[in-house]
């Protein structure tokens, strides 16, 4: 990480955000870094807030501190990558849909969506909304936005998510109706509308850093990359004007800078705090700690295409070696809940009826012996690339030793860890942010998935996914997803030991911060619903 050489980094208004607080970010942390057949629900706002009662009060400025991306930051919503980018984009722009707390798609600019019988053609009706310059949001704007994202010459984040859409064949039926033609049947098409970075911009829009025009709850006042973005209330917002007069998103890459600024009153909202910080301040009365549950799956990824994990008995043994509570308490400092070897606890379609796994070292030893793996030696790859990774590796090494397994912990580079472990090695620390369970399947568990860290490749599993995607009835589709999860629970390659809370801190005057909003879902960083008491 290097300091930016663009003007002074000390800001006398915010002494907590001094030199060390304006360091350039090293990676895309937002990647941690989202279904009904007819979008007939409401716009998806949550009433589950951290305020403890009271009527919203209008007025005031909220200052929010995030880790940022330095002088290279942009307000182009299609280049959204960091959490700070996502918060700024959410202030200025809207998507057709977004993810609710259960990771089901909730309508936003889309008032409804309806498929044909074959699930390969979807009609989306837009709600009445206007851009900041007063022009209505139209079907042409939607198609322009998606075609811009899909431009093969660009590297926009949502490009892969939009791949199922045939954008050449898709068309605007009228001003507020879009007909999307798909390349194949896709029951979970609303997930595409909610994809990270799939924001709607006006037709022809290109200049985002000086004159960004969106349909979001705030309008831009000023933007200094790597420093600050200031917004004012959009009184004409389709969902209703925000309570705040102004919002300022400030960059402070070090957690200590964010916490000190919150404690010192220079900001009212601090994003991404550690469990240690939360424990130090929770219940003390000076600031409020908000925990967003189920925000990050924590796991060990076993590569199922190579020894020793090409033997499902060895994989089951490792499932039974793990003491999940010890891992959550030690690696996450208790800031989370135990997993059950499946992604998406609490999300739509999650198979919550399966028995919770407990450690069973006798059974693990028996399975290893049957597999001819007595005295097994395995290298566990880890890195300081994510909080808790090195701690989890050490804890699991000790747990494995109790079953006669010798784990050698190998610490890799933060800069190349994810790429290094995607294809190399046999066992590694792994985590994932919030996404629909269907997206987890398609991105990580199909034979052709490009981020298949466990090398799980089974044609019958691929066929079940295609069956689910071509099943119109939601109950029947859920049954197929449950069957897929039972298979993964029995013999999959992800040893999912926990789900980490995402932690933010606020001043005691802040109200309306949702408590059930995994990172990157609709109500996370939802500043149009926040107010100051």
Image: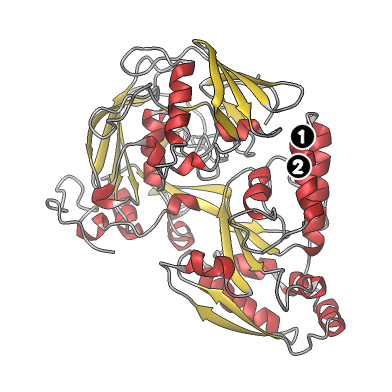
Name the residue located 33 percent from the left edge and 18 percent from the top edge.
Answer: 132
Q: Describe the element under mark 2 as helix, strand or loop.
A: helix
Per the image, the residue denoted by label 1 is 470
Residue 482 in view, yes or no: yes
Quadrant the N terminus occupies? bottom left
Q: Quadrant of residue 114?
A: top right
Q: Quadrant of residue 137?
A: top left
Name the residue located 74 percent from the left edge and 87 percent from the top edge.
Answer: 404
Q: CA distance from mark 2 to mark 1?
A: 6 Å
Horizontal side, residue 66 vs residue 458: left or right: left
Quadrant the C terminus occupies? top left
Categorize mark 2 by other alpha carbons within 10 Å: few (<14), some (14-19), many (20+).
some
Q: Quadrant of residue 312?
A: bottom right
Please state the horizontal and vertical placement of residue 409, each as a whole percent of the image: 56, 81
Please state the horizontal and vertical placement of residue 241, each as a whole percent of the image: 39, 19
Name the residue located 75 percent from the left edge and 50 percent from the top edge.
Answer: 462
Please state the horizontal and vertical placement of residue 88, each as a whole percent of the image: 36, 37
The colour mode here is: secondary structure
Do the residues under discs 2 and 1 have CB atoms within 8 angstroms? yes
Residue 427 vertical position relative to residue 243 in the rendered view, above or below: below
Horizontal side, residue 150 vs residue 358: left or right: left
Name the residue located 50 percent from the left edge and 64 percent from the top edge.
Answer: 418
Seen as rendered, the residue at the extreme front is 168
Task: Return the mark for residue 526.
Answer: none
Q: Describe the element under mark 1 as helix, strand or loop.
A: loop
Task: Return the mark for residue 466.
Answer: 2
Categorize mark 1 by other alpha carbons within 10 Å: few (<14), some (14-19), many (20+).
some
Residue 339 vertical position relative to residue 85 in the rendered view, above or below: below
Residue 508 in view, yes or no: no
């Amino acid at each position: 990480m290097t300091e930016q050489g663009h003007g002074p980094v000390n800001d006398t208004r915010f002494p907590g955000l001094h030199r060390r607080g304006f360091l350039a970010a090293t990676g895309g942390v937002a990647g941690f870094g989202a279904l009904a057949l007819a979008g007939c629900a409401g716009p998806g706002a949550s009433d589950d807030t951290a305020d403890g009662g009271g009527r919203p009060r209008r007025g005031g400025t909220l200052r929010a501190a995030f880790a940022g991306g330095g002088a290279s930051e942009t307000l182009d919503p299609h280049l959204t990558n960091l959490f700070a980018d996502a918060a700024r984009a959410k202030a200025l722009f809207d998507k057709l849909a977004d993810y609710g707390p259960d990771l089901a798609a909730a309508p936003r600019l889309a008032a409804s969506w309806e498929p044909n019988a074959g699930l390969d053609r979807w009609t989306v009706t837009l709600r009445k909304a206007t851009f900041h310059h007063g022009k209505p949001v139209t079907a042409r704007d939607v198609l322009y936005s998606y075609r811009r994202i899909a431009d093969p010459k660009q590297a926009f984040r949502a490009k892969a998510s939009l791949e199922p859409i045939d954008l050449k064949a898709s068309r605007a039926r009228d001003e507020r109706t879009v007909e999307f033609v798909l390349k194949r049947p896709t029951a979970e098409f609303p997930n595409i509308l909610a994809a990270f970075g799939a924001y709607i911009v006006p037709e022809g829009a290109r200049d985002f850093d000086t004159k960004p025009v969106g349909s979001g709850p705030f309008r831009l006042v000023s933007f200094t990359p790597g420093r600050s973005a200031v917004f004012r209330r959009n009184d004409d917002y389709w969902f209703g004007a925000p309570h705040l007069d102004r919002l300022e998103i400030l960059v402070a890459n070090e957690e200590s800078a964010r916490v000190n600024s919150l404690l010192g009153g220079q900001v009212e909202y601090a994003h991404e705090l550690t469990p240690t910080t939360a424990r130090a301040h929770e219940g003390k009365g000076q600031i409020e700690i908000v925990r967003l549950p189920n925000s990050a799956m924590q796991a060990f990824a076993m590569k199922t295409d190579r020894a020793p994990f090409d033997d499902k008995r060895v994989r089951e043994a490792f499932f039974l070696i793990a003491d999940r509570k010890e891992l959550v308490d030690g690696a996450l400092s208790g800031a989370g809940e135990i997993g059950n070897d499946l992604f998406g606890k609490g999300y739509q379609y999650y198979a919550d009826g399966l028995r919770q796994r407990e450690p069973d070292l006798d059974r693990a030893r028996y399975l290893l012996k049957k597999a001819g793996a007595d005295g097994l030696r395995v290298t566990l790859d880890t890195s300081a690339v994510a909080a808790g990774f090195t701690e989890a590796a050490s804890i699991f090494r000790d747990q494995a030793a109790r079953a006669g397994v010798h784990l050698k912990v190998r610490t890799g580079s933060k800069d190349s860890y994810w790429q290094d472990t995607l294809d190399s090695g046999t066992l590694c620390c792994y985590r994932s942010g919030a996404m629909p369970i269907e997206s987890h399947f398609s991105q990580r568990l199909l034979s052709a998935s490009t981020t298949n860290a466990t090398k799980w490749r089974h044609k019958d599993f691929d066929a079940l996914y295609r069956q689910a995607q071509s099943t119109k009835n939601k109950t029947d589709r859920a049954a197929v997803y449950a069957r897929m999860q039972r298979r993964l629970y029995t013999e999959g390659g992800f040893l999912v030991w926990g789900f980490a809370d995402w932690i933010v801190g606020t001043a005691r005057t802040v109200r309306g911060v949702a408590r059930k909003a995994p990172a990157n879902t609709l109500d996370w960083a939802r500043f149009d619903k926040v107010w100051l008491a």
